[in-house]
Amino acid sequence: MTSPVRTLVVTAPVQTAEPAAAGGEAAATDLGPAAIMIESLGKRYGTGPLVLDDINLSIEAGQFVCLLGASGCGKSTLLNIIAGLEKPTEGAVTVASGKAAVMFQDAALFPWLTAGRNVELALKLRGVPRKERRTEALELLDLVNLADASDKRPHELSGGMRQRVALARSLAQDRKVLLMDEPFAALDAITRDLLHEELERVWRQTGRTIVFVTHNVREAARLGQRILLMSSRPGRIVNEWTITDTGSRRIESPEVARLGDEITDQLREEIRRNAA
Amino acid sequence: MPLESQAATARVHDPGHDELRRLEAGLDSLQAVPETPRGAFRRTLDGVVPPILLLIGLVAAWQVYILIARPRPDLIPGPLDVFGALASAWSSDRLQLAVATSLERGGLGFIIAVAIGTPIGLLLAECRPVRRALGPLLSGLQVLPSVAWVPAAIIWFGISDATVYFVILMGAVPSIANGLVSGVDQIPPQLRRVGTVLGASRFEMATLVVLPAALPGYFSGLKQGWAFAWRSLMAAEIIVIGGDIGFGLGTMLDQSRELADLSGVLATILVILFVGILVELVIFAPIERRLLRRRGLMAAGLR
């Protein structure tokens, strides 16, 4: 690790305090072009309770946003709606660049294809001519340090390697927005730590807009430029932190720990409200 | 917000990246699953030797019983009698003819059954209303012994090959269709979601995702379909005799029975058994092993 320890300036939380009245102001200060616009979005399944309530969000192009919340707060649902996999009950979602690439917790590689062919399939579905697929797939695998594993099948790869192939596959879609649903939650801590670095490097190198869903506070504090905290039942965005720092930071650093503590306190507050 | 510098750092050689690469490479090799491939020769030897030893043991026990108990040869023939019956059937060319006729019928019937069962299976798997309507019927047909169709088939088609093929189809088609349905049902939903996310059209989803993903289930349906086809064929051949119908293994079995030639009956049963084993070993087992190993679905002991 060569990253110098830079001061981490955490802007005072944009307190959208009263969850009931949340939303509106959160999206107020949008600078630059919005890659993703979410306007008064609500979601319920059938006649069930509200899962998401009045979500308003504007995400800038090239931003790394972490969506943080306890289990069942609807953060995955929100991601699926942005991905177009689910329909919102009310409100609208606009992804400026059209569709988004998605990565799941489970790598979900096609087990009958080699790592290289898995990436090639994404290229094929994107309409890349046959001749160029092979070289482009190898380049993408090289981006995640897996050029040598191109001919391996998914079951021959470790969990971390599979996730990196899945990352290469989502990059193969060549979409400006990358949505990630707890992609590292099932990995061991050592691997996860390395993949944080890998992902951050890929993000800096490709300039993608990333929305990263997690329930791991430290992970959010380690990766995000902007961290959105969601409450549960119904899911609302209750607070957000913007981190004014362009350099890499380690998960063990005191800045990350301090930010993590702060977020954890409020997360617990939100969870406690669900007691009794 | 400070975004300005991120795009600029692209494609710059930095030592931090090299270190990350080495770290990752180290972790990858630590986590790699070591494969211990066995040679094809060793594998064949492991697969062939135990059943052959068992066979020799069984035949020896049979011969010992004949020597000690001395039963009536017309009720319990010895291995030598059965082998003699086999040799005489071979020298009169009846055995070759019967095996060729039955294999041809079984093979052709099986191929037709695949051609009919596959689209039915796909339709059932992908179209809910069709499945609700036809699913129970197809499961019922799978349980119904296809020999039960023989009387009806004789009335419809007379004593002809059409009767035999009809019975084969009624036996094999439901298995093949059901195999494909369960293969499709077992596809992890995540794979379809990935297909959607990658922008697959309906056709691409079916050909590039659903069919390959359903292949293991479909294949076991095919195997079962063959077993049903072969069984139904033998039953049909024993019952449907005369007319312009060819001479198959079932016919040979029935002829030996009429002559009260127990050695001939046992010899024919053994031939039917061995043809079944041979088709499994030569055609289905290698394809299945390949299919499963490529997906990492094979138990370690069977590699």
Image (cartoon, rainbow, N blue to C red):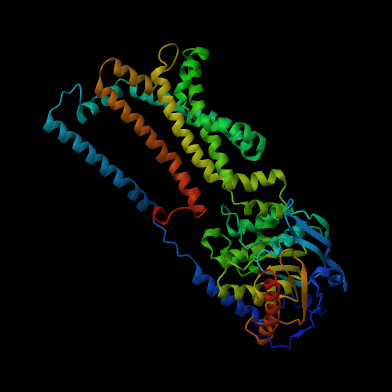
Q: Is residue B235 above or below residue A226?
A: above
Please tell me how many numbered marks the rendered image carries.
0
Q: Position of residue B16 (x, y in %)?
A: 65, 81
Residue A170 visible, this angle? yes
Residue A136 sits in quarter:
bottom right
Residue located at (53% from left, 39% from top): B179
Residue B97 visible, this angle? no
Residue located at (33% from left, 21% from top): B253
Q: Residue furthest front?
A: A276
Q: Is residue B57 above or below residue A19?
A: above
Q: Is residue A58 above or below residue B18?
A: above
Residue located at (77% from left, 67% from top): A236
Front residue of this view, candidates A42 and A247 = A42
Q: Position of residue A211 (x, y in %)?
A: 74, 67
Q: Quadrant of the C terminus of chain B?
A: bottom left
Q: Is residue A89 left or right of residue A267?
A: right
Q: Quadrant of the N terminus of chain B?
A: bottom right
Q: Position of residue B198 (x, y in %)?
A: 70, 55
Q: Position of residue B122 (x, y in %)?
A: 62, 37
Q: Is residue A162 above or below residue B129?
A: below
Residue A61 sits in quarter:
bottom right
Q: Is residue B236 left or right of residue B6?
A: left
Residue located at (62% from left, 36% from top): B124
Front residue of this view, candidates B29 and A176 = A176
Q: Is residue B219 left or right of residue A95?
A: left
